[in-house]
């Protein structure tokens, strides 16, 4: 499902239960980006926030994941 959302919007929004879950999700997304090998590279925006801190989608913590091109 994340792949389909990424292909359309080049962004991923994730709401998790706690701060620990937020850190784990960021780690999981980085690992997914590393395993996904593309010749032209990979760059996308991820917004992750814990549900108790979520007020607006635009206020979510934003991370840019960049995977260099494979050789």
Image (cartoon, helix red, strand yellow):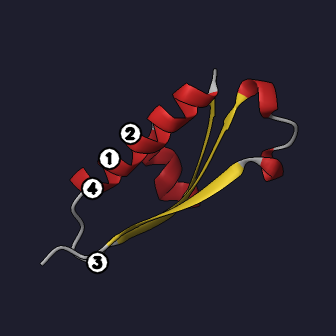
Q: Label 3: which residue?
A: 40
Query: Does 43 sit above or below residue 28?
Result: below
Question: Which one is in front, 40 or 31?
Answer: 31
Lower position in the chain sequence, tag 3 or tag 1: 1
Q: Residues within 10 Å of mark 3 (few under 14, many from 20)?
A: few
Q: Residues within 10 Å of mark 2 (few under 14, many from 20)?
A: few
Secondary structure of residue under mark 2: helix
Question: Which one is in front, 65 or 9?
Answer: 65
x then y, percent, for residue 60: 74, 47
Please tell me the numbered disc located at residue 34: 4
Mark 3 vs mark 1, CA separation in Å: 16 Å
Q: Is residue 32 left or right of residue 54?
A: left
Depth-wise, is mark 3 or mark 1 nearer the camera?
1
Q: Residues within 10 Å of mark 4 (few under 14, many from 20)?
A: some
* Disc 3 to disc 1: CB gap under 8 Å: no
**Looking at the figure, which quarter contains the C terminus?**
bottom left
Mark 4 vs mark 2, CA separation in Å: 10 Å
Name the residue rendered at 80%, 34% in the picture.
54
Q: Label 2: which residue?
A: 28
x then y, percent, for residue 21: 53, 27
Name the residue rendered at 18%, 73% in the picture.
70
* Disc 1 to disc 4: CB gap under 8 Å: yes
Lower position in the chain sequence, tag 4 or tag 3: 4
Secondary structure of residue under mark 4: helix
* Disc 2 to disc 1: CB gap under 8 Å: yes
Residue furthest to the front in view is 20
Q: Is residue 27 left or right of residue 10?
A: left
Q: Label 1: which residue?
A: 32
Secondary structure of residue under mark 3: loop
Mark 4 vs mark 3, CA separation in Å: 13 Å
Q: Is residue 3 left or right of residue 19?
A: left
Question: Which one is in front, 40 or 63?
Answer: 63
């Amino acid at each position: 499902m994340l792949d389909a959302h990424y292909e359309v919007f080049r962004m991923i929004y994730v709401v998790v239960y706690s701060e620990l879950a937020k850190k784990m999700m960021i780690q999981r997304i980085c690992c997914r980006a590393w395993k996904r090998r593309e010749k032209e590279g990979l760059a996308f925006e991820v917004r992750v926030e814990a549900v108790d801190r979520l007020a607006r989608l635009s206020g979510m913590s934003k991370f840019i994941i960049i995977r260099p091109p494979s050789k």
